[in-house]
Amino acid sequence: MAEGSLLSADLRLAGRLDARFFALLEALDATGSINRAARTAGLSYKGAWLLLEAACNLASEPLLETSTGGSGGGGTRLTPAARGLLDAWRAVQAEHCEFLRAQEARLARHPALAGLLRRMSMKTTARNQYAGTVKAIEIGPVSAQVTIALKSGQEATATMTSTAAQRLKLKKGKEALALIKASAVVLVADFAGWQLSARNQWAGTVSRIERGAVSSLVVLTLPGGATITSTVTNEGVEAAGLKVGVAATAVFKAYAVMVAAQP
């Protein structure tokens, strides 16, 4: 399916013959050389032979014909059995893609569900990801400031270049995602009368601490039930007195907030 699709599925014949195998067969049919076919299919020469040998050992008829020397210089060709297998794959794959397109259209008739799946489909290493809508946007000559009202009730303010804001076509009311790396989140257990310049400050309660050899993942539960995770050194956890049940505030600067949107 095309990039951005809500549905995907891996098609396999006999539970083991997948798209890689048939891409190799197609390349082999076009080039007559396992070496060139492997490069075309994005496989190593050894990897290509492993795929072919595994299939050939299970087939009731030969799948490959190999010739050496001669005026043509030799090579490897598909047998009629292999071409029949390749034709079957193409037919099943076409019907498989048509089925996915039909189900995608079915999902599109349920905007709320489609929107949920679209928000969940983005793959990123950012630990903290939140869905919301643009509440306010100020675009200057060089930079832009965007405030996203999150569905969890919090607000996240992000700073980006004006070019980026225009490329994302950000405007008030548009759906957007706020992404914040755990390493960019500072936890404050006691402000001691001081105020911080960081634009984003979310108060919550420590609900989980996962200790590692050097650092810990500290999870804060926010009002409304959303969570935010911070990476803190083990010494930092001890120094701040962070324990489950302790009140703390997650602090992060506006430039640490990445915004994603459907242009």
Image: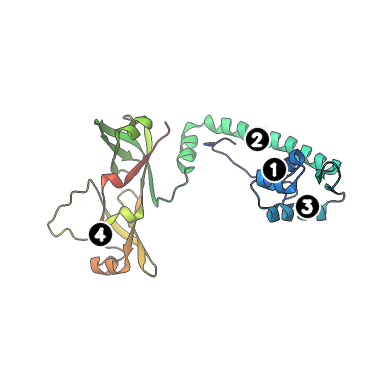
Residue of label 2: 97
Q: Residues within 10 Å of mark 3 (few under 14, many from 20)?
A: some
Residue 258 appears in which quarter of the rendering? Answer: top left
Label 2, label 1: how many angstroms apart (C-alpha)?
Answer: 16 Å
Label 4, label 2: how many angstroms apart (C-alpha)?
Answer: 51 Å
Q: For the residue marked with disc 2, what is the amino acid?
A: Cys
Q: CB under 8 Å between callouts 3 and 1?
A: no
Q: Whole-percent x and y of residue 143?
A: 26, 35
- Determine the residue positioned at 26% across, 33% down: 142
Q: Residues within 10 Å of mark 1 (few under 14, many from 20)?
A: some
**Which mark's residue is nearer the viewer, 4 or 1?**
1
Q: For the residue marked with disc 1, what is the amino acid?
A: Ala
Q: Whole-percent x and y of residue 237?
A: 29, 66
Q: How is the image coloured?
A: rainbow
Label 3, label 1: how many angstroms apart (C-alpha)?
Answer: 14 Å
Residue of label 3: 55
Which structural element holds mark 4?
Answer: strand
Quadrant holding the C terminus: top left
Query: What numbered label is drawn on residue 247?
Result: 4
